[in-house]
Amino acid sequence: GVLEIGPGIGPLTEQLAQLADQVTAVELDQNLLPILQETMADYPNVSIVPGDILKLNLPQLVTDTFHGLTPIVCANLPYNITTPVLTVLLESGQFASITVMIQREVAKRICANPRTPDYGAFSLYCQYHAACELLFEVPPQAFLPAPKVTSAVIRLTPTTEPPVPVVDKQLFFRIVKASFAMRRKTILNAVSAGLSVPKEQVSNACATTGISPTARAEQLSMEQLAALCCAIESK
């Protein structure tokens, strides 16, 4: 069962319909709905759902439309809502895989490794929830009209267990966001300011985990940030 987001006039929808048992395409633009109904008329396994993917009840949608099929996502995402869409898809816990075309720069951030310029809070968020792969790039000339950016297709495969042990997930992501909020700050200053905790507490947590208090966020792996979270939590 394939969920498509933003089908437009249906070129990808038609290809998906030839491969999948069921395609559910969510389209926000009311003007496109009659066109989709016409272009998809020959495919009884396609359901067009009017609405905003960010506001829909995804577990209910999956239950109502896929009837025991393995739910996956395949979509050419609207680039201006890439981050919130991927967030709701991952948080829903409904999909075996999420394969989407997005702006190349965002794709590189999602799949980035520590100690690279693209590595940041959203890298860690996505990699905490899924295995992230940049599959291939799509040049501007593949589109009509050609955009000013290069695109890329990525695949996120949600994991059943987090890659790092974290007791308090909310605290972990507060630390991640604080660490990258001001990238030039040391981990000591960034976490202390972001969490409003004494520097001594953060310094002790760094000592416990073997992390240099003068390190920058982009130098730290997910495992190191998770260890720092557990150390801060136990203080």
Image (tube, rainbow, N blue to C red):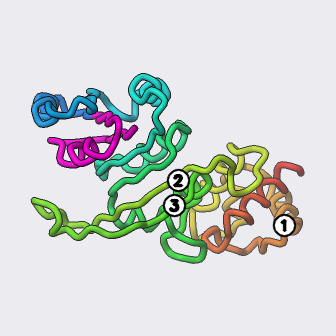
Q: Tag 2's secondary structure? A: strand
Q: Nearer the viewer, residue 109 or 151?
A: 151
Q: Within 10 Å of the Cα at label 3, are there few (<14), some (14-19), or many (20+) other Cα atoms?
A: many
Please state the horizontal and vertical placement of residue 101, each as a whole percent of the image.
33, 57
Residue receiving disc 1 = 209
Q: Tag 1's secondary structure? A: helix
Does residue 29 lie above or below 103 as drawn? above
Q: Which of marks 2 and 1 is nearer the N terminus?
A: 2
Camera-side mark, 2 or 3: 2
Please state the horizontal and vertical placement of residue 65, each as a whole percent of the image.
39, 26
Q: Nearer the viewer, residue 154 or 190?
A: 154
Q: Disc 2 versus disc 3: distance between alpha carbons?
A: 7 Å
Please state the horizontal and vertical placement of residue 185, each as a whole percent of the image.
63, 68
Which quarter shows the N terminus?
top left
Relative to residue 49, is residue 114 drawn left or right?
right
Residue 157 has which mark?
2
Q: Within 10 Å of the Cα at label 1, are there few (<14), some (14-19), or many (20+) other Cα atoms?
A: some
Q: Give the range drawn in magenta.
A: 1-26
Residue 132 has which mark?
3
Please state the horizontal and vertical placement of residue 223, each as a whole percent of the image.
73, 64
Q: Which of 2 and 163 is in front in this view?
A: 2
Q: What residue type is labelled 2?
A: Thr
